[in-house]
Every structure is written in structure tokens, then in C-alpha cells.
Image (cartoon, rainbow, N blue to C red):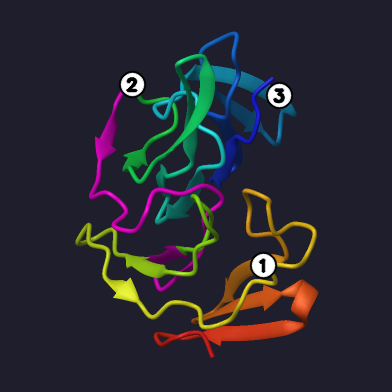
Amino acid sequence: YEYRPISFTVGNKGYVISGYTASQTCKVWEYDFAANTWTNIGNSPLGKRKAGVAFVVNNKVYMGLGYEMINFNGQEVRVFKNDWIEYTPGASYHAVKANFPGAGRSFALGFIINNSLYLGFGRASTRLKDFWKYSPNTNTWPQQAGWQGAYDENDPSAGSISPRNVVIFSSGTTGYLVRGALNQFWHFSNSPFV
């Protein structure tokens, strides 16, 4: 099996890609909702990547980040990634895009407003709160004001790799952040989270 894969939908197909498996090359699996079938359509362009992200903007897939495990002097070490690609499912190539300018990370969170992707949060050696806007038309990453809230470092998930109890999503032209454990609700609309 593949652990912590990336998933997304394009049109009437769903995709599960990458993740980590020690025994084989990571694959791209395509799910046909109408036929209820899974098809292996090739190797993952991200390799054995855990906890990356993918977003679909105008039927184009943009993905990256996450981490790889490497063996260093007999110990497994996480290598956090900040790469970014444009991918067409089933294609034998992908377009390399401008790297995500923040720190490499896993479990990043984001949403789409007006065909631009807003992405940040996640975790590397610490939980992160920075936020960036990716414009596919210009392939640029202008930084946005980061979240001013606080993680509860005393909660049981504080040592976790993921920023648990934080969820972000968008509706129309507004993004929202919910910090469940602290009963916090924030919104974002071309301005900082407030």
C-alpha cells in the first residue's frame, strides 16, 4: 500500500498518487466513478513522497511539497520538499514550476479563490503559519499575511507532524480557517486572516 498519498479529481476521474511504500515504485491510480474501476496509469512524478498536496485550477493539476524518507547512516530521515509541478494525469512528463518559496513542509493547507491558489501552514521541524498565493498564469508566489492565531502546544497532537484541528477551505471569494480545539473561526478575503 501507499502511505499518506496525494489525491485529487479532474473531470469525472479521481486520482491517488505518490505516498510512500518501501517495496515498490509509487504509482498513479485513476478511479473511474461511472465504471467503478481503478487503473494504474504510470509512475508518480513525485516519487515516494508523503503528505504532499495537489490542487486543480482550470483542469490543471498543481502539486508538490511533502517529504521523502532517506536512509542516512542507518537512520531514516525526513527531507521536506518545496518543489512545485504542473501535472497532467497519465502524461509521461510534467512541467516544473517555480518552487514554493516558504520552507519545505508536509501537510500544507490551502484553498482556491478566483483561480489562484492560497497555500501555507503545515509542518517541518515546527508548525508553520505562513501563507502564500500562487498564480498559475504568472507562475509567481507573492507572500500573504500569515495567520495570527496560535496553535495549542499543550494539546495531545502538539508533537504530531500535522497541524491537527486546523482546517481551511473557501466558499466563493472568501477563505476560512477553523481551529476546532480552541473554538476559533477566521476568514480571509484578499487580506490577512481576521
Callout 1: helix, strand or loop? strand
- The image quadrant that residue 116 belongs to is bottom left
Q: Is residue 162 visible?
A: yes
Decide: is 172 above or below 87. Answer: below
Quadrant of the snapshot with the C terminus:
bottom right
Query: For this rendering, which residue is in front, 126 or 33?
Result: 126
Which residue does the numbered mark 1 point to in the structure image?
A: 166
The answer to whether residue 63 is left or right of residue 98 is: right
Q: Is residue 37 above or below residue 135?
A: above
**Lateral position of residue 143 relative to residue 53, left or right:** left
Q: Is residue 14 left or right of residue 97?
A: right
Q: Residue furthest left?
A: 138
Using the image, tell me which numbered label, if any, was put on residue 92: 2
Q: Which residue is tagged 3?
A: 37
Query: Residue 77: x percent and y percent?
Result: 50, 29
Which type of secondary structure does the marked residue at label 3 adopt?
strand
Q: Amino acid at mark 1?
A: Val
Q: What is the magenta range?
A: 92-119
Q: Amino acid at mark 2?
A: Ser
Answer few, some or many: residues within 10 Å of disc 1's Cα (few below 14, many 20 plus, some between 14 and 19).
Answer: some
Closer to the chain start, of discs 2 and 1, is 2
User: Going 37% across and 37% down the picture, which residue do you hit?
Assistant: 87
The first of marks 2 and 3 along the sequence is 3
